[in-house]
Image (cartoon, rainbow, N blue to C red):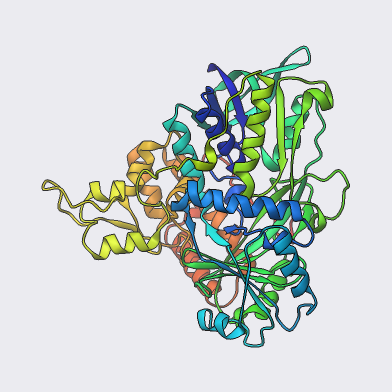
Amino acid sequence: MKLSTELLILGGGATGLGAAWDAALRGFKTVVLEKGDLAHGTSGRYHGLLHSGGRYVVRDPQSARECAAENAALRRIIPSAIEDTGGYFLSTPADPADYADQFLAACHTCAVPVTEITTAQALQREPLLNPRLGRVFQVRDAACDSFDALHLLAHGLRAVGGEVFLRHRVTEILKSGDRVVGVAGENLATGEPFTFHADLTLNCSGAWAGHIAALAGCEVKVTAGKGVMIAMNSRLVNTVVNRLKPPADGDILVPVGTVSVIGTTDTAVPSPDRYAIEDWEVDLLMAEGEQLIPGFSRHRALRAWAGVRPLYDPGGKDTRHMSRAHALLDHEERDGVSGMLSMVGGKFTTFRHMAQLLVDAACAKLKTDRPCVTARTLIEPPGTPLHALPKRLEALESGKWQTASDATTDTGQPPTASHQQPAAIICECELVTRSQIEANLRQSGSPILNDLRRDLRLGMGPCQAGFCAYRAAGIIHETLGHSHRNSNSQLLQFLQERWKGERPVMWGHSLRSLELDLHIYRSILGLDTLPTEREIEVYPTERTS
C-alpha cells in the first residue's frame, strides 16, 4: 500500500490523536499510524486521573498551570469521558505538617482553584478515610476514562476527514537527503508492507519517540519511567484522594468506574515494551493505601498493571524528580534533519495543549497560518459512553436492551417490532452483549480479542475473563471465520494478558478466583494443549525479568 498525506502522525495515543484531530480541524489532510490498537500504549495504562494541577504546584509550577487550564478545556471538549469526582489533598499522620501551607500558597500562585474544608466535611463524604486526618483541601481533580477519550478523538478525527491506521508498525523513515519524506513499515494484521509519503511527519510515539527519532538519524533520549498501579475490586472512594506531601509512590487513590486505583510507583526501565511488576511495588502500594483507608489491604486487589511515562529531561535525574513537562523538538534546528517534529514528555491531562503547540509548529514549517479551535470544539459521542456500566445496567433493567439492534448501538432506543429477543450477555461483570461484540467486529478493521477489552471492557470485571473470554473467542471465530489455530492463539494471548495483571496480587479471593479460572481453561477446556499459530509470549515477572 502506498499513500500520501500532508501531515503524518506517528502514534495513536492521546498526543498523537489530539494532534491529528487538531490538524484535521485546521484543514490539513491527516493520517495517524499506530502500531497497536487505540489506547494500546501509555495512554491506556494510566490511573485515570484528570489533574487539577495540585500535585505539581510546589515542585513543577509550569506543569501545574498547564494542568489547571487543560482540566477546564477537556471538560468542555470531551465531557462524556470525564466523571467530575472532585479531589482532596489531605494530610495523614505520616505526612509533613508544614507542607499544607506551602501547598496552599503555591495553588494561589499557580492559579489552581483550591478550597480548604474541615476534616468532618471530608469524612462525611468519604467515611472510609483515615479518621486521623489533618488539613484537607478540595481541588478540581476528576476521573477521565482514557479508552473513551481516545475513541472520541478518533471519532472526531474521522468526522473531519482524518484517517487512523491501526497495527501499522513503522520500520523505516524515508529520507531525501537530509529531509524526512515519509515512512515505510508493515501492516501487522496482514503482513503487507506499506509506504506513506508526507509533507511533514510528527513523532508522537511517547515512550517510543527515541526509537522513531533514531530511524531518522536523530538522538532523542526519552526515559521510560515505569509506574505500577493496583485496581481494587470496589469503589472505596467517590472522590480523588491525594496525600498532602511532595509527590511520592502510592499517594493517589482514584475512583474509576466501578473500581478504585491506587498508584503509582516510579522507576526507570530499559525498555517500554518489557518490564516486570515487582513484589515490593505491590507491597508498597498496599501499605500506602492503609495510610489513606485503614483496612485497605483487607479489600480485594483485582489486578496490577504498569504504564511507562515518556520522560524527557536531559539532566538525567531519577524518574520521580524528572519534570512532567513536555518538549517540542525541531529536528531541523536540532539535528539538521528537516521534515519531522517530535513532541516528547508531558502527561495525559495536557495532551490537547501539547497537540496545539505541535500543530502550530507544523503550520510554521508549512508556511501557513491556521488557528487552533480545539479548546472550544465539543466532540459529540456517537452513542452512550462505551464504558459507562451504570448506563448499561439501566438499559438492561429497564428492558431497553431487548433486541440485538438495541445492544449494538448501546443507545437505549425502544426495540423494533421484528426483533424482540432479550440481549445475550457475554460478559456478566461489565454487561457486554453479543450484539455489542458483533458490532465492534464489523466496525474494526483488524479486530482481536484484546481489542474488545479496550473497546468494551470485556474481561475487566471481577472474574477477569474467567467466564467471558471463551464465549467472546467463539463469537470472533464464528463471525470472522478465523482458523481454529488463530482463535486459540487469540484466546491464549488474551488470557496471558489477564494473568500478567493477576499474578502480582495472587492472594485471598483473587487466588481462589484464579484457581477456578485454571480449572475452566486447563482442566475442562484443555486450552494449554490446543494447537496455535504462534508461541504465546510469556511476560516477565520479578523472577524472570
As drawn, is 18 to the left or to the right of 487? right
Pick the residue in front: 347 or 213: 347
Q: What is the residue that sits farthest to the top in this orientation?
A: 177
Single out the residue that lies furthest toward the left. Answer: 417
Residue at image point 33% right, 44% down: 438
Residue 364 visible: yes
- Count every numbered label the image shows and give the total: 0
Q: Is residue 178 above or below residue 545?
A: above
Residue 257: percent from left, percent from top:
47, 63
Q: Position of residue 311 (x, y in %)?
A: 76, 47
Identify the residue at horizontal 56%, vertical 19% (top origin). 5
- Which part of the image, by quadrant, shows the C terminus? bottom right
Location of residue 161 by image quarter: top left
Residue at image coords 44%, 32%? 158
Q: Is residue 329 left or right of residue 506?
A: right
**Can residue 167 be seen by looking at this rendering?**
no
Classify residue 129 by image quadrant. bottom right
Q: How far across and down, in percent of the image, does residue 232 sit?
A: 55, 70
Q: Decide: is 193 above or below 447.
A: above
Residue 233 lies, in percent from the top left, at 51, 71
